[in-house]
């Protein structure tokens, strides 16, 4: 069980303690007990994420005790399966250099024992409506735990075994919450030849004191003890200690509230005494039945069961402590700016130094080639440019008169030849790109236009033969006639 410091968060973190546990930064110690201690811690992440948690670990002197470590881990595993507004939620479980711990919901509030002490210092006591309210909330949380099943539908048969004023928290917004599942179980261990019970004996059930197997009705009895003490303002089992107290609880009956206060409401007394039945068979079968009877009692008595009213009562008792806690948290945040934990920094360093099959972060991203720089598209563009230049060159002399009519190729397409007369006085200026040259097949001269030559001996025939014999260096593609 954890003892909270008298001044709330004023108990500083011991300077010899490590500042970090895993990814959690320890801000201060909330309290410590016989086996475990509790810290206010902070965790941060990307985008300014920041969350405060309560971090619970086994005391340093018991770090090598495998039994206590297993109890801590068992509590974390068990509580992580419970999702209820009246149960403190567990977020994470981890280990750092042999220190086992788990992070859970940080409840800004006080436990019932602290509430009783604060009210006594101010000369007050809890109104009946607030007592009924917190017992209803605790019963609802316990029933949720008792009904919990595994993934395959098997009942887990959870029994808290340590329901006491110190393990019932009331938040400053008026919400009762059950805490401490597992680390303070009433287990039987052997210390040499002596058998001892671990737990708070004044809040044990008779079957728990007798060492019998426990079920959910044991928690109902323990909650009944808390209810009895809150209603009457005194301890139920006093004057006895140790084994005598164990025997007294195991074999006796709790006194009726009317024996101490004759004006005690009879209908409320029936509810309390049924929860405190020594025989489990005559006791409430579960915490839900106790909850329903209390809700019916509150309706009949017109009690205002309100979280807002309970929150106002908490603030009237702990106004100074609330202001101190808020100021202390702001101071912790100011003095210890958030940053990466040593584990995160080690991970980043190892990632930077250790080779990995993944692509390193400093490799530039592959560049994407624009579509207009693709080779195929560039070649197509050059081809189009060549065609345009050829068309421009062919139509460059369009304003000058042509003397040669168009002639048809063998394939039937019409090709416009250059103006020979315009090219003779000035050298031909070829374009930068090659020009398409068309080789014309020889065409027979029309007989109607051939002039009549005067008759002669044979020089004309020899001249025709010389015409067909061309020089070796003559270019057949030339537009000029052969010499």
Image (tube, rainbow, N blue to C red):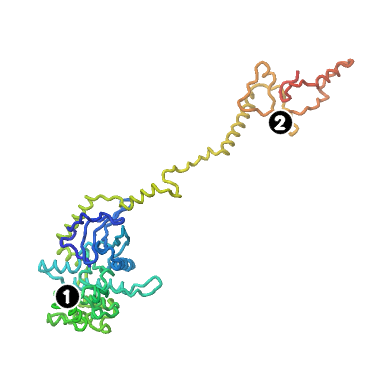
Give the image location of residue 442, x and y in percent: 78, 27
- Who's the residue at 31% across and 51% down the image? 340
Helix, strand or loop under label 1: helix
Above or below, comparing residue 210 to residue 434 in the picture: below
- Tell me the mark number nearer the camera, choosing from 2 and 1: 1
Q: Residue beneath label 2, please?
A: 414
The answer to whether 105 appears left or right of 244 in the picture is right
Number of residues whose C-alpha sits closer than 10 Å to that of mark 2, classed few (under 14), some (14–19) or many (20 or more): few
| Residue 24 in sight from this viewpoint | yes
Q: Is residue 384 left or right of residue 247?
A: right
SS label for mark 2: strand
Looking at the image, tell me whether mark 2 or mark 1 is earlier in sequence order.
1
Give the answer, above or below, for where 3 lies relative to 186: above
- Which label number is shown at residue 229? 1
Label for residue 184?
none
Q: Nearer the viewer, residue 102 or 386?
A: 102
- When asked about the image quadrant of residue 232, the answer is bottom left
x and y percentages locating residue 146 in the rendered image: 31, 74
Number of marks present in the image shown: 2
Give how far across and how far down residue 290 sits, in percent: 25, 77
Q: CA distance from mark 2 to mark 1?
A: 119 Å
Quarter of the image for residue 222 reads bottom left
To which quarter of the image does residue 427 belong? top right
Q: Position of residue 144 (x, y in %)?
A: 31, 72
Picture layout, residue 49 above or below residue 295 = above
């Amino acid at each position: 069980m954890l003892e909270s410091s008298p001044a709330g968060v004023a108990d500083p973190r011991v300077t010899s303690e490590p500042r970090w546990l895993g990814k959690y930064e320890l801000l201060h110690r909330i309290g410590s007990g016989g086996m475990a201690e509790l810290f206010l811690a902070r965790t941060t992440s990307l985008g300014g994420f920041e969350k405060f948690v309560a971090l619970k670990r086994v005391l340093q002197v018991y770090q090598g005790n495998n039994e206590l470590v297993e109890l801590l881990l068992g509590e974390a595993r068990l509580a992580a399966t419970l999702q209820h507004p009246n149960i403190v939620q567990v977020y994470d479980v981890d280990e750092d250099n042999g220190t086992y711990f788990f992070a859970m919901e940080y409840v800004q509030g006080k436990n019932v024992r602290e509430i009783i002490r604060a009210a006594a210092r101010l000369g007050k006591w809890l109104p009946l409506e607030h007592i009924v309210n917190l017992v209803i909330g605790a019963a609802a949380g316990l029933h949720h735990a008792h009904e919990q099943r595994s993934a395959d539908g098997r009942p887990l048969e959870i029994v808290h075994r340590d329901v006491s004023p110190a393990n019932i928290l009331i938040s400053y917004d008026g919400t009762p919450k059950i805490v401490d599942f597992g680390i303070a179980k009433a287990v039987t261990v052997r210390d040499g030849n002596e058998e001892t019970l671990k737990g708070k004996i004044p809040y044990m059930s008779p079957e728990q004191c007798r060492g019998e197997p426990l079920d959910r009705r044991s928690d109902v009895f323990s909650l009944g003890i808390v209810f009895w003490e809150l209603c009457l303002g005194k301890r139920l089992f006093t004057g006895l200690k140790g084994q005598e107290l164990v025997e007294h609880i195991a074999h006796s009956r709790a006194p009726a509230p009317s024996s101490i206060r004759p004006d005690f409401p009879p209908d409320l007394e029936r509810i309390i005494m049924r929860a405190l039945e020594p025989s489990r068979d005559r006791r409430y079968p579960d915490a839900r039945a106790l909850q329903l009877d209390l809700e019916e009692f509150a309706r009949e008595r017109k009690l205002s069961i309100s979280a807002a009213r309970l929150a106002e009562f908490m603030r009237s008792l702990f106004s100074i402590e609330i202001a101190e806690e808020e100021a202390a948290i702001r101071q912790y945040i100011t003095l210890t700016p958030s940053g990466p934990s040593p584990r995160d920094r080690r991970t980043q360093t190892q990632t930077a130094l250790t080779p990995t099959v993944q692509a390193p972060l400093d490799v530039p991203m592959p560049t994407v080639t624009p579509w207009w720089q693709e080779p195929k598209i560039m070649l197509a563009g050059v081809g189009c440019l060549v065609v345009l230049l050829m068309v421009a060159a062919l139509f460059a002399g369009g304003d000058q008169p042509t003397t040669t009519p168009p002639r048809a190729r063998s394939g039937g397409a019409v090709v416009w030849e250059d103006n020979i007369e315009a090219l003779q006085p000035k050298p031909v200026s070829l374009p930068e790109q090659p020009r398409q040259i068309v080789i014309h097949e020889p065409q027979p001269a029309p007989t109607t236009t051939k002039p009549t030559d005067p008759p002669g001996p044979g020089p004309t025939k020899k001249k025709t033969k010389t015409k067909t014999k061309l020089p070796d260096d003559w270019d057949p593609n030339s537009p000029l006639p052969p010499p």
